[in-house]
Every structure is written in C-alpha cells, then in structure tokens.
C-alpha cells in the first residue's frame, strides 16, 4: 500500500454510527477547556480514536461476476467446514466457513460478499469471548444473515461480537436487494465476521491472510482453493 493510499485510509470520513461518540468527545473537550485542561486532552484523544475507529473508506468491488468477496477487513482466523447458524434454517449440511477477526485497528465496516436478496436476519444473544477463538462462532452474541443469490444458492454472513464489542449494527432488512461490496453494518469495538459459502464452493484464502472488505476475492465457483 502506497503512502497516499495509507493516508486516505486513515483520513477517511467516519461512519454515521460514530457521530454520537464524536459528539461526546467534543463535549468533554469543551468542558475541559472551561474547567480542567487535562480533561480537554482526554476528550481530544477520544475524538481522534473515534475518527480512526469509525473511518469508512470507499472500496471498489472487482468487476468479476460470480466471485465472493471478504465481508470485512481483518485476518482469517478460521477456515473449516461447519453448518450455518441454526437460526437461519439453512440445514445441517457443513459448508466452508471463513472467519475474519477484526482488531481494534481494522476498518470495522461490514460489506456484502455477493449480490442477492436478504431472506433472513436473526439476532442471538450470547457471551463475549475473544472473537479470535473458535468457540466465539457458537457462544458469542451474533447477528446472522442469509443472502439468496440470483442462481438460487444461499450464503450466510454472521457478525460476531468480541471481547470488548457490545454493539452490533446491521443496516439492512429482510427482503432488501443488495450488491457485492455494499456496506451493511459494523461492530464496535473489535469483533469477527464469518462467511458461509454455498455448498460445493471452496475458499481461495488461507489462515493468517489479510482481507480487505468488499475487495478481496475469497472464493469463486468452480475454482478449487488451497483449503481443499
């Protein structure tokens, strides 16, 4: 990544979900200027953190039909076969799952992996284990979404709360038509996003690989991956 690209990433405008936090930080700054200068510095640091955490850079989806894109920035920490979350009613047949861990330093905007129609969204309360752990998929608080593709196949995307994440934001609804790479929500502050591929589709990524949400191709029908 070039210096210009890195600068644009850091200075990207914040997502609207961060506006209340930015307003709170600015209020603390103003109060500190009136009452106690160290408080103003704390407020300024909080504002800078929120500007960085909630940054929402533009992304360009590859012009390739049929591919599946990373639903989040971060690092691949899970690559296995498992049934989709039971609350989506997609059956018990195992399919490839790609789990992406988002550290507090990653862009936290979630993106649609492939164009289609959202057929189900199901929220489930749970625990708040470290999102990089295997058991986070089953035990942590999560928001699961099923997307039916034009050919009839269905994928699942799951937003999973992490150790310090306490708020999952999903900005789409059942019945919405969505496009590949489009924003659909975020999780604060540190989390994980799992993608369940259609049956028979293999991942093209590896454990430890870095993802760019809405841009990195993680799978392509008919193309076997290294995890096969």
Image: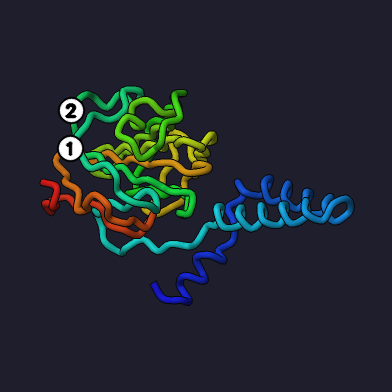
Local packing at callout 2 (Cα closer than 10 Å; few below 14, some 14-19, many 20+) is few
Residue 81 sits in quarter: top left
Mark 1 neighbour class, 10 Å CA radius: few under 14, some 14 to 19, many 20 or more: some
Q: Position of residue 17 (x, y in %)?
A: 60, 46
Residue 112: percent from left, percent from top: 39, 48
Residue named by callout 2: 93
Of the 4 image quadrants, the one containing the N terminus is bottom left
Q: Which residue is mark 1?
A: 199
What's the residue at 52%, 39% (across, down)? 169
Q: Residue 105 appears at what percent x and percent y?
A: 48, 54
Q: Residue at x 35, y 23 (%)?
A: 87
Of residues 41 and 159, the one nearer the viewer is: 41
Between the C-alphas of marks 2 and 1, the distance is 8 Å
Residue at the (17%, 37%) spot, across then down: 199
Q: Report the front residue among 191 and 69.
A: 191
The correct choice, above or below, for 163 with respect to 40 in the image is: above
The reply, left or right, for residue 37 in relation to residue 54 is right
Residue 19 drawn at (x, y percent) = 66, 49
Disc number placed over residue 127 in the picture, else none? none
Q: Is residue 168 left or right of residue 60?
A: right
Query: Dots 2 and 1: beta carbons under 8 Å?
Result: yes
As helix, strand or loop, the secondary structure at mark 1 comes to loop
Q: Earlier in the sequence, mark 2 or mark 1?
A: 2
Q: Is residue 160 left or right of residue 17?
A: left
Residue 195, compared with residue 14, is above or below; it is: above
Dividing the picture into quadrants, the one containing residue 176 is top left
| Left or right, residue 158 beside residue 204 | right
């Amino acid at each position: 990544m070039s210096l210009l690209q890195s600068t644009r990433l850091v200075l990207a405008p914040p997502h609207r979900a961060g506006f209340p936090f930015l307003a709170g930080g600015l209020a603390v700054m103003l109060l500190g200027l009136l009452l106690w200068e160290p408080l103003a510095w704390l407020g300024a640091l909080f504002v800078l953190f929120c500007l960085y955490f909630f940054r929402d850079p533009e992304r360009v989806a590859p012009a390739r039909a049929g591919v599946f894109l990373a639903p989040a920035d971060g690092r691949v920490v899970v690559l296995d076969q498992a049934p989709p979350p039971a609350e989506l009613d997609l059956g018990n047949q195992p399919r490839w799952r790609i789990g992406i861990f988002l550290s507090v330093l990653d862009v936290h905007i979630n993106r649609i992996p492939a164009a289609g129609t959202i057929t189900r969204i199901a929220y489930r309360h749970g625990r708040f284990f470290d999102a990089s752990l295997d058991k986070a998929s089953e035990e942590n608080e999560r928001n699961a979404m099923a997307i039916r593709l034009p050919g009839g196949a269905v994928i699942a995307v799951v937003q999973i709360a992490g150790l310090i994440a306490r708020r999952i934001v999903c900005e789409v609804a059942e019945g919405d038509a969505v496009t590949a790479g489009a924003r659909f929500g975020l999780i604060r502050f540190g989390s994980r996003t799992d993608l369940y591929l259609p049956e028979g589709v293999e991942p093209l990524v590896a454990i430890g690989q870095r993802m760019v949400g809405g841009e990195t191709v993680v799978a392509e029908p008919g193309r076997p991956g290294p995890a096969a």
